[in-house]
Amino acid sequence: DIQLTQSPSSLSASIGDRVTITCRASHDTSNSLAWFQQKPGKAPKSLIYAASSLRTGVPSRFRGGGSGTDFTLTISGLQPEDFATYYCQQYNSYPLTFGGGTKVEIK
Amino acid sequence: QVQLVESGGGVVQPGRSLRLSCAASGFIFGDYGMHWVRQSPGQGLEWVAVMSSDETNKNYADSVKGRFTISRDNSKNTLYLHMNSLRPEDTALYYCAKDSWDWNGRFDYWGQGTLVTVSS
């Protein structure tokens, strides 16, 4: 199984800040890596797939990067609606696995 | 637009069974793989099971293998999860999710979830 380790588990930031979340895989995922945003009481929402491809309709301030086993999600110019929990997920092999999540809170 | 609506959750005693349903609309259901993903209260996401578009391929998380069965009825645009021998650790919000292709594992749409509570 491919284990995904996200860091940090939580962070505090201000409106307008740039934040970066890291996801490290235990094995090469061949860039089959997605990022999701989840707000309280809501289903996850797809942001990024194939490590760096932005889902249609997602603001360009979200950027995915990395390859192999090390990936990042960067939010440039944090907006009020971006305060949420973010998860990475690998779809290179079954069982599909998720990172533990990163909660982005208002400073 | 794509809609996924889960139902069938509730409170059930340990060892009992439950069947979840996911009604799909807004896309050609029979062309896509479908998944179940769960989230325990206050916890992260755990993939549970997948079924391919033509029902020939299934895969399960080890935590549910042998107890849960995924199925679908393409004529009714509905996905199911049959859960047997339920345990307290199965308590979670269960989401169905649409695959972006057949069963490549990339989710593009999620339902709102149905809550299953396993408790005596």
Image: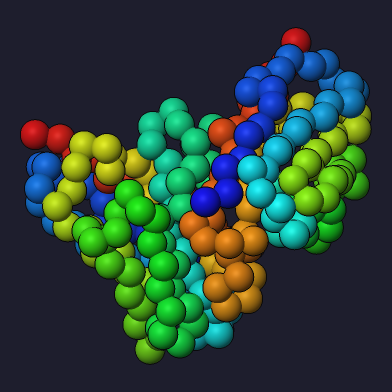
Q: Residue at x 84, y 20 (%)?
A: A15
* Depth order, front residue of A2/B116: A2
Q: Residue at x 23, y 61 (%)?
A: B66
Q: Is residue B71 left or right of residue B95?
A: left
- Number of marks: 0
Q: Is residue A58 above or below residue B2?
A: above
Residue at the front extreme, as displayed: A27
Q: What is the x, y in percent for residue A1?
A: 52, 51
Q: What is the x, y in percent for residue A48?
A: 76, 52
Note whether residue A64 is visible.
yes
Q: Is residue A51 above or below residue B106?
A: above
Q: What is the x, y in percent for residue B114?
A: 35, 50
* Depth order, front residue of A12/A92: A92
Q: Residue at x 74, y 45 (%)?
A: A69
Residue at the top extreme, as displayed: A107
Q: Is the C terminus of chain A in the top left, top right, bottom left or bottom right quadrant?
A: top right
Q: What is the x, y in percent for residue A34?
A: 70, 52
Q: Residue at x 30, y 54 (%)?
A: B64
